[in-house]
Image (cartoon, rainbow, N blue to C red):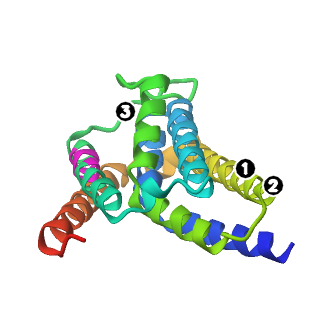
Amino acid sequence: MEQFLAVAVAHFLALLIPGVDFFLIARTATTSGRRNAVGICVGIACANGILVAAAFSGLSLIRTPMVLHVVQAAGGVFLVWIGIAFLRAETGVERADGSRTGRTTWTRNLGLGLVSGLLNPKNVLFYVSLAAALAGASPAALTLYGAWMVTIVLVWDLFVAVALGSPRALGRLSRVLPWTAKAAGGFLVLLGLGMILTLTTGPMR
């Protein structure tokens, strides 16, 4: 029980740290509505499930430095791409039903959330580190931990999507949404470039 509480608290605290997944959900909820943001949330949860299963099953491939470098490079490129999309995008127009206009679709957002979760170095490093710390846990315990973490990721992301995509929240944020999107886009571009530059300037092992 104590081990479960430690895992649950560590995972939730890591979840509270804003990252690319959070910005992606927030941006989608405020520009395309809650329904489309749910697709992002489901995709991110599926990605977390894949990473948890890979880390907890003892898959050594994702623990090798070369694979981690590849994930970091791909994640950096993805962050730059998402950041540029944020900088170029315009806010949508809210419909009467609370959804937002735009060309985005639920299925497309599902795939986008999946890619975001898989290429997020924070997710990869966290689950790999956690798997190493839980090396002595039983398969049943690892299954319980994994199911719990994926569920919490989905519930938290859905909360963010619903909270930021509600008409009341959109009304309050309408004036600052364009500037917030630009700021988030610039932050993601700088973060992605920093990840890429770290690989090019640091030693390869």
Q: Mark number for residue 140?
A: 2
Q: Nearer the viewer, residue 72 or 151?
A: 72
Foreground pick, 178 / 171: 178
134 left or right, relative to 2: left
Check disc 2 and give the amino acid type: Ala
Element type where label 1 sits in the image: helix
Mark 2 and mark 1: span between their CA atoms?
Answer: 11 Å
- Judged from the image, the secondary structure of the residue bearing numbered disc 2 is helix
Is the residue marked by circle 3 packed among few (<14), some (14-19), or many (20+) residues within 10 Å? Answer: some
For label 2, the crowd category at 10 Å Cα-Cα, with few meaning under 14, some 14 to 19 and many 20 or more, is: few
* Majority secondary structure of magenta residues: helix
Residue 31 vertical placement versus 83 (above, below): above
Q: Are marks 2 and 1 in contact (CB under 8 Å)?
A: no
Give the magenta-colored segment's residue range. Answer: 78-84
Membership of 80 in magenta stretch: yes
Residue 53 point in image, percent of width and height: 61, 49
* Residue plotted at (40% across, 41% down): 115
- Measuring 36% from the left and 25% from the top, which residue is drawn there? 102
Amino acid carrying label 3: it is: Gly
- Per the image, label 3 sits on a secondary structure element best described as loop
Q: Nearer the viewer, mark 2 or mark 1?
A: 2
81 and 122: which one is in front?
Answer: 122
Name the residue beneath numbered marker 3: 92
The three-letter code of the residue at mark 1 reads Ala
Marks 3, 1: nearer the viewer: 1
Crowding at dot 1, Cα within 10 Å, few <14 / some 14-19 / many 20+, comes out as some
Q: CA distance from mark 3 to mark 1?
A: 35 Å
Quadrant of the snapshot with the C terminus = bottom left
Looking at the image, the residue that sits furthest to the right is 1
Q: Position of residue 62 (x, y in %)?
A: 44, 56
- Give percent across and percent down for residue 175: 37, 51
